[in-house]
Amino acid sequence: VSYNMLQGDAAAALLEGVLVCGTSSGQLSQLDLGWNCLGQGPQKGRVVQLLGSVLSSCDGLVHLDVSFNSLDPQDCRCLAENLAENRTLWGLHVDGNAAVLDADG
């Protein structure tokens, strides 16, 4: 779903579907949302909150790309907080956002 300028209500609807699928024995293991606009628009808080819920609740998700989505430091902090207890995600791509990664990820 990369390169689609996805934001606002459309992004929220997509992430709600991902969340339902990922928490009800769905088979989604990889999700590429790179090069969209998730961190833009009046619904960005809701979108980031849903993305955080995906990180904390979707145990089958092993790879997520949210590169270049205009996510600011507060958005990235929210994602990091939701990621703290995740033990199933192997790959996370956040280039082009205001995230800072240390050696531990």
Image (cartoon, rainbow, N blue to C red):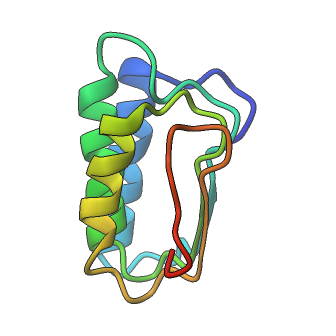
Q: Quadrant of residue 80?
A: bottom left
Q: Residue at x 30, y 37 (%)?
A: 74
Residue occupying image coordinates x 40% and y 11%: 41
Query: Looking at the image, which is closer to me, 103 or 30?
Result: 103
- Give the answer, above or below, for where 23 lies relative to 53: below
Which residue appears farthest toward the front when viewing the image? 102
* Residue lying farthest to the right in this orientation: 3
Which residue corresponds to the image point at 43% horizontal and 75% vertical from the top-left?
26
> Which residue is more in the foreground, 92 or 12?
92
Where does the N terminus fall, quadrant-wise? top right
User: Measured along the vertical axis of the image, is residue 15 above or below residue 58?
Assistant: above
Q: Quadrant of residue 69?
A: top right
Q: Is residue 103 left or right of residue 40?
A: right
Looking at the image, which residue sits at the far top? 42
Q: Residue at x 31, y 49 (%)?
A: 77
Question: In the rendering, at what x and y percent does residue 12 appear?
Answer: 35, 33
Q: Give the camera-side residue of 33 and 78.
A: 78
Residue 4 image point, x, y percent = 69, 26
Image position of 61 (left or right of 54)? right
